Amino acid sequence: MNAMQDKAAAAGSGSGESTKVSGGRSATDLAIRYGFLTLLAGLLVFFSVFTEGFFSPFSAVFIFQSVAITGILALGVTFTLVVDGFDLSIGSTATSALMLSAYMMVVLEQGAVVAVLACLLMGAFIGLVNGLLIVKTRVPDLLATLGMMFLLIGLQRIPTEGRSISTGMVLPSGEKANGVFDPAFLWLGRHKFDFIIPNLIPVSVVIFVIVAVLVWVFLEKTRHGRLMYAIGSNARAAALAGTNVNRYKIMAYIFSGVLASVGGILLSARLGRGDIASGNNLLLDSVAAALIGFAVLGAAKPNAFGTAIGALFVGILLQGLTMMNAPYYTQDFVKGVVLVVALVFTFVLTGRRAGAHH
Amino acid sequence: MADAAIEIRGLTKAFGANRVLRGIDMALARGEITVLMGANGAGKSTLVKVICGVHPADGGEIFLNGAPFAPRNPIEAIRAGVVTVHQNINDGVIPDLDVASNLLLDSLAEPGAGFFLKGREIRARAREVAASMGLEVDVRRPVRELQLADRQLVAIARAMARKPELLILDEPTSSLSAAEAERLFALLERLRAQGVAILYISHRTSDIRRLADRIYAMRDGAIVGHFAEKPLDYEAAVTAMLGQGLEEIRLDNRPPGAPVLELEGLVLAPGARPIDLSVHQDEVLAVTGLVGAGKTRLASVLYGLEAPLSGTMRLGGAPYRPTSPRAAIDAGVFLCAKDRGSNGVLHDHPLDRNMSVPFLERFSRLSFVRARAEARAARDIIGQLGIVCQSEKDDIATLSGGNQQKVMVGRWLGQPSRVLILDEPFQGVDIKARRDIGAKIRETAGGRATIVMAAEMDEVLEIADRIVVLSEHSLAGDHRNESLDLKQVLAQVAGQAGAPEAGAAGNSGAAP
C-alpha cells in the first residue's frame, strides 16, 4: 500500500504549496483517501445491525465466494487499465473457458489437468491476439477487444450448435457425449477448506486471494509493474526511457486473458456443466469493480488493492440487499449507482486536487 | 496613457494562503507590444488567467477601454475582445478539422449560426481571414498536416477573426524555429500596426529584443520593473525580474579528449550530404540549426529510434548500431528528449519514479524495486540540481516548469554515460533555471561526450565548447566556441552559406 499512500501524500502536500485552503484542504484529502473505506465500513455496520444473520462467518464466506470470480476477472482488467488500455473481452473469454473446459471433459473425455491447461492456453492466446491487434495493427483497444468479444461469443457456440454441454447430450454428429466432469475439476468449484469452522473457505476464494496478492506485488513492487504504470502515464516517455512498450502492453492483455479464463474455469467447476447462458454479468461486474478501485485510498488510478476492495464492496452490497429481501432486479441498478458514485469520487475530488496545478 | 486598451489597478489574487498576485498595476496600450517577463512561478500565468476570465480577481480593478471589466469566464472575456493564445499550440486548434473550419470555428459555435454547413462560403471567408493574416496555406488541409508554426498562425488568425482589443500570447515561440518565429513576428507587427494591444509573454531573449515596445518585469506576484524608454534596457529588466544580476558566463575551454562517438558518412535524409563527425571525451558539442534541420533526426539515429539511410557509427572505437533506446542506454548513450510534457514527464508520478524509470533494472533486485535506493538517488539529484520541492515523493505536476525540466535532465545525469544527448534542454525554462541546468551539464561533462541540440543561439553560446551547424540534414559548419564569427554561423544556420566545409567536417577548425 505504501506506494499509493506515498503518492496521495505527495500530491496532497504538493497541492498545499500552491493552494493552501486552510482546514478544508485536509478534510478533502481525508475524504478522498478514506471516504470509500469508511463507506464500506458503514455498510457493514448497517447490514449487521439491520439484517438478521448478516454478521456471520458463513455470510462472509458467501460474499467472498460470490465476488471471487468477478474479482479475478477484475484483477485482469486492472492490468489493461494500468497500461492505459481496456479489455472488453474478459467476460466472453471467461465463458469461452467455461465452454471449452466442459467440451474437453464431456465431449473429448479428457481429465481435469488437460481441461485446465487448455483453458489457460486459450486465455493467453486470446490475450496475445488482443495485444497484437492493439499494438501492431493499432486498432484502438476498446474496438479490438469489443470485436474479440463478439467473436468469442459466437465461437463458443459453434461446436455444440448453440447448446449447453452436459453428460449425455447429443452432439451435432448424432453421437452421444459420454464424458463426465472430472471430480478433480469439480473440486475447484465445490470443495471448501476447514478454517476454524469445518467446510468454510471455498477453493475459489483462496485462489482469488492468492491472485490478488500476486497482482498487487507485481504491480506495486516489481519494476515490471512500475514500467506498466509508466506506460499508462506517458507511453512515449516510457519508450524514450528504454521501455519495450509493446511487449508490456501485450503482456497486460495476456494476463487479462489468463485471469479471465481462470474465472471461467472456476465458474465451470461450480456449475458442473457447460451452461451457455451463464456468465452474462461477468464483464460489467468486473469492470465496475476495477473502476470502483480507483476511488479506494484516493489512488485515482487502477490498482490491485482497490480492485479487490471494489469487488468486495459490490458483493457486500448485493448480499446485504438480498438478505433484506430487495428484489433481484434492483441489483443492477444498485451496482450502477455505486459505480457512478465511485467515479464521481475519483474524478471530481481528485480531479479538483490535481486541477490546482493547471 | 490615454490610449490604453486595458488598464489594471491593484490586482490581487490568492490561492488559499498563497498570494500569487500582490497588487499588479499595468497598462497595455493600443498598437504596442508589451512584453511581460518573469521567472517560472512569478505569477505571469495567473495574471493572464485573471485577465482572460479563467480565475476571478480577489481585489483590484481592470478597465477595458475605460469601462470596468470583470469577466466571469473565458467566453465573456473573448466576447469583450480579450483573446488569448496559449502556450500549448494544440489547445488553440482542432487537428482533425481543416484550416477553414478552424479559422471560423468561433463563428460556427455561435448561437444562431445556422444548422447546415455552407462549405463554399466557409472556405471563401476562411481564405479572406488567412489572406489578411499573411497565412499561406490551403484552407482545405487538415490542421494536423500543418507544421507547428502554421498551426500557431492558424490559432492566432482564428483569434484575430474576432477583431480583439487585446491579444495575449503566452510563450508562442517555445516550440517554433527561428524562421517560423519570424513569420509569427511579421504577423504580430502587422497587428500592432492595426492598433491591437498585444501582451507577449516569453523567456526568449531574441523575441523580446525583436518585438518589445515596453517591458514589464514581474517577480513574486508584483511588477518590479517597467521599461518604456527606447532603447529598452533589457539587462535591467532581467535583473529586476530575477532580483539579482546574472553573472557573465565564462566557459573554461577544456581540451577535448579522445573521440568517443565517430560518425562516418551518416546520411539522415534522402538527398542530404553524408555527415562525418566525431564527438570527444570531456567535450560539450552543441548542434544547432532550424527546426527541421535534422537535429532531432540525428538524436533519434544516435539513440536507436531510427536507422540512418547509410553510414556507420562507432562508439569508443567499436561499431555502434543501436536498434532501440534500450540498446542505446545499455551502450551508455542517453537521450534527454525535447518537449518534456509529451516525451519525458510521467504524469501523476512522484519525482523519484520519474528519475529512475530508465534505470529501474539497476535499482531492482530479482525484479523487485529497491525503493530506498531509488529515493536516495533521487535525493542526490535533487540536491545537486537545486530542484525546488518538498521531497522526492512530490508529484511532478506540483513543480514549476523549470524544476520539471531539471528533473528530466537529472534523470540522465544520475547515471554515468559515455554519450549524453540533450535535445532542447532549455525549452520553456526561465533564464535562471537555464543557467543552472547549463552549469550542471558543463560541470558533469568530464568523462563523457555531451551533445546539446538547441536552435536558440544564446543557449548554444552559453554551453558549447564546439558548435556544429545542421542545415537540411547536412553539416553546414563546425566551429570552436571561441572568437566565433557569429554572422557566419547564422548564415550557415539559415542555409545561405552553401556547403563550404561540409565535406571536410569532423574536426575542421575554428572560424576565421
Image (cartoon, coloured by chain):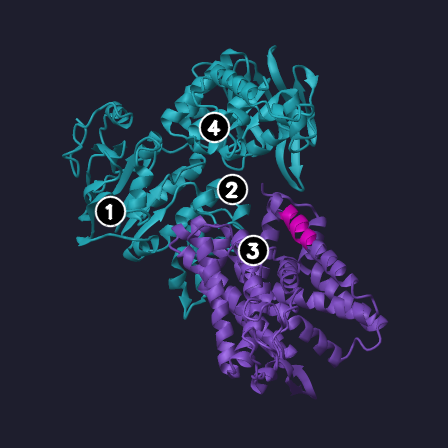
Instruction: Residue under label 4, please give it.
Output: B152
Query: Is the residue at mark 4 from the same chain as the one at mark 3?
Result: no
Instruction: Residue under label 1, please give it.
Output: B282
Highlighted range, magenta: A343-353
Relative to B120, does residue B391 appear above or below in the rendering?
below
10 Å neighbourhood of mark 4: few (<14), some, or many (≥20)?
many
Q: Is residue B452 left or right of residue A132?
A: left
Q: Is residue B413 left or right of residue A303?
A: left
Q: Is residue A98 visible?
A: yes
Q: Label 1 is placed on what type of residue?
A: Asp
Secondary structure beneath label 3: helix
As drawn, the label of residue B409 is: none
- Distance of mark 4 from mark 2, alpha carbons? 24 Å
- Distance of mark 1 from mark 4, alpha carbons? 39 Å
Furthest-bottom residue in this view: A198
Q: Position of residue B426 (x, y in %)?
A: 40, 38
The quadrant where residue A209 appears: bottom right
Nearer mark to the viewer, of 2 and 3: 3
- Residue lying at 39% horizontally and 22% vertically, measured from the top left: B182
Q: Label 3 is placed on what type of residue?
A: Leu
- Distance of mark 2 from mark 1, alpha carbons? 31 Å
First in sequence: mark 1 vs mark 4: 4
Circle 1 chain = B
Instruction: Residue under label 3, please give it.
Output: A146
Instruction: Residue under label 2, please give it.
Output: B400
